[in-house]
Amino acid sequence: MGNKGKLCSIALASSVLVFVFLVLISAAASAARITKIGTGYDPAVYGDKVVWTNGVVIHLYDLTNRTGIRFSSSGASSPDIYENKIVWHDESIGTPRIAVYDIPTATKSYITQEVDQYSRPAIYDNRIVWSANDSVYLRDISNSTQEKIGNGTNPDIYGTKVVYYSYSEDPEADITIRMYDIDTGERKTVVSYGDPNIPRIWDTRVIWSDVYNHQGYIAMYDILTENITDVTHPLDTDPDGNEYGASTGTHVSIQDDKIVYNKCVDDYEGKPGVYLYNISAGQSTLIYGYPEEVYTTPEVYNNTIVWGLDRNYVDGTSGNDIYLCDLAAGPEISQT
């Protein structure tokens, strides 16, 4: 993730962390649908599999069998998963690489060209995207071809579309979210106002965080209609004159009709915690409450939401739990 995507790093004191974990344990005990499945960072989910890392090993958890395996890869971070392939940033030999792991065969290979310490891979089908030195790269692992497709950082991929953050590619705008069509080679600007970052794409929708104020808010672009709508609220004042909004942009994820995100303050827009936004209904639901200024990394696939604490905002590299919410089970959740 690029430096802008990281925002302003906030270290939590150990006493606050203890309090947070006590809150988590209490909440997990009272809500049957919330389950702790491990310890680490950067969870990702696809189908019935969840992957994460604690910086030393990669963990793979099977939701169907409720079993997990792990394999060594010191210096692992930012894993992503698609069907039976896992990718992650690897520095096990001291040099940045992108690891590609095939689950059925338990075989591992590496991408070594044009990879730097900030390269965060994303995978769809046989294609992997990442950025290095402010350039965006695409590799097709089915034929081992690789090419530079743009100038920017924080890429994500769905089908034949790649989205990324750029500050140098569009001559008419300073900061943009750009979209690249693999089939046609066409590039276009999705948005160029505010401070858009952390783009994510699923099907015909692109979301991002506008981090112009505080921790940012979430906006969404419809590829078919070319309309942009606000998912959460930008900075504003409530009826009593207090600031609210711009507290939801630290981590965003989209899949089908669902967006998940972290909210870090208690204000007019809602309580802090992990949220689910239903695009069709235009409604946000608080999934799991936290104290203020706790930063999480929710990801979603079908009825499964997973999250951990954001390692960019905590003091330490271990002892942080990975949680899972099964939306198809348990009691109803109160809506905001």
Image (spheres, helix red, strand yellow):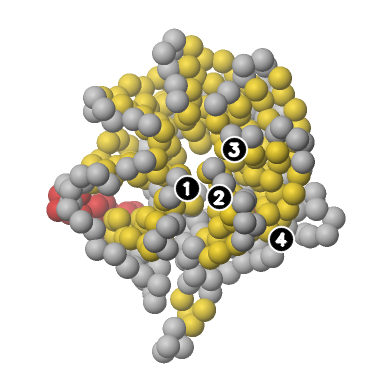
Q: Are marks 2 and 1 in contact (CB under 8 Å)?
A: yes
Write down the residue under mark 2: 205
Q: Residue furthest bottom?
A: 240
- Quarter containing the N terminus: top right
**Where is 118 relative to 207, above or below?**
above
Q: Is residue 223 left or right of residue 293?
A: right
> Residue 192 has which mark?
4
Which badge, 4 or 1, is on the more N-terminal residue? 4
Question: To which quarter of the image does residue 93 belong?
Answer: top right
- Is disc 2 placed on a helix, strand or loop? strand
Residue 130: x %, y % from top left: 64, 35
Residue 256: x %, y % from top left: 45, 45
The three-letter amino acid code for the residue at tag 2 is Arg
Q: Residues within 10 Å of mark 4 (few under 14, many from 20)?
A: some
- Measuring 48% from the left and 22% from the top, which residue is drawn there? 85
Q: Which of label 4 and label 2 is nearer to you?
A: 2
Which badge, 4 or 3, is on the more N-terminal residue? 3
- Is disc 3 placed on a helix, strand or loop? strand
Q: Residues within 10 Å of mark 3 (few under 14, many from 20)?
A: many
Residue 42: x %, y % from top left: 44, 39
Q: Is residue 206 left or right of residue 277?
A: right
> Which residue occupies the foreground of this view, 74 or 301?
301
Q: Residues within 10 Å of mark 1 (few under 14, many from 20)?
A: many
- Is disc 4 placed on a helix, strand or loop? loop
- Measuring 71% from the left and 41% from the top, which residue is drawn there? 180
Which badge, 3 or 1, is on the more N-terminal residue? 3
The three-letter amino acid code for the residue at tag 1 is Ile
Label 4 – label 2 distance at C-alpha: 17 Å
> Which residue occupies the foreground of this view, 317 or 326?
326
Write down the residue under mark 1: 254
Write down the residue under mark 3: 157
